Image (cartoon, helix red, strand yellow):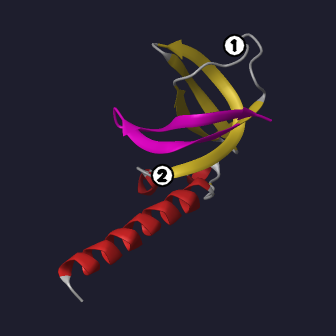
């Protein structure tokens, strides 16, 4: 085979691979973790947690709140809008990336769902 043919085959295989990875990544659900299970080993990973919605505070461009479950708490940050801030959820589910901020674990929420 000549070099141009090998190049075309490699290009087609690469494009198909990227396309398949894109489709698969959209269908992968985050790992559901209990609030007490959120630890430093999860930093950088996308997870889902749920618990009692407490201590809502408005911050620049979003909200900071705490999810509590079984005596454990985790701070969450959400840069988005809630439909009605006055109607605070009793319990919520959060999907987002675990990160360390000022020495404290928190979840940078992509989605916040009321339960």
Which residue is identified by label 2?
Answer: 39
Taking 4 as reference, is 91 above or below it?
above
In this rendering, does residue 19 appear at all? Answer: yes
**Could you tell which of marks 1 and 2 lies nearer the N-terminus?**
2
Residue 79 x/y as whole percent: 52, 24
Q: CA distance from mark 1 to mark 2?
A: 29 Å
Residue that lies at the very extreme toward the top in this rendered image: 86
Q: Which residue is nearer to you in this view: 22 or 90?
A: 22
Magenta-colored span = 93-115
Secondary structure predominantly adopted by residues drawn in magenta: strand
Task: Specify the label residue 98 is tagged with.
Answer: none
- Residue shown at 55%/35% (left/top)? 109
Please tell me whether mark 2 sits on a helix, a strand or a loop. loop
Q: Which residue is nearer to you in this view: 13 or 27?
A: 13
Q: Which residue is nearer to you in this view: 21 or 34?
A: 21
- Mark 2, Cα crowd under 10 Å, few <14 / some 14-19 / many 20+, is some
Residue 63 x/y as whole percent: 55, 20
- Magenta stretch: includes residue 114: yes
Residue 1 x/y as whole percent: 24, 89
- Residue shown at 64%/46% (left/top)? 49
- Residue shown at 76%/25% (left/top)? 89
Please tell me whether mark 1 sits on a helix, a strand or a loop. loop
Q: Which residue is nearer to you in this view: 95 or 70?
A: 95
Which residue is identified by label 1?
Answer: 85
Residue that lies at the very extreme toward the bottom in this rendered image: 1
Q: Is residue 50 left or right of residue 62?
A: right
Nearer the observer: mark 1 or 2; the answer is 1
- Mark 1, Cα crowd under 10 Å, few <14 / some 14-19 / many 20+, is few
For the C terminus, which image quadrant?
top right
Taking 41 as reference, is 2 above or below it?
below
Taking 10 as reference, is 106 above or below it?
above
Residue 51 x/y as whole percent: 71, 39
């Amino acid at each position: 085979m000549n070099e141009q043919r090998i190049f075309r085959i490699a290009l087609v295989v690469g494009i198909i691979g990227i396309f398949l990875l894109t489709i698969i990544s959209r269908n992968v659900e985050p790992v559901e973790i209990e609030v007490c299970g959120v630890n430093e080993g999860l930093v950088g990973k996308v997870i889902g947690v749920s618990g009692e919605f407490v201590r809502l505070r408005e911050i620049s461009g979003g909200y900071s709140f705490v999810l509590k479950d079984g005596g454990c708490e985790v701070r969450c940050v959400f840069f988005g809008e809630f439909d009605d801030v006055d109607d605070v959820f009793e319990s919520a589910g959060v999907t987002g990336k675990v990160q360390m901020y000022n020495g404290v674990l928190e979840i940078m929420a992509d989605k916040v769902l009321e339960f």
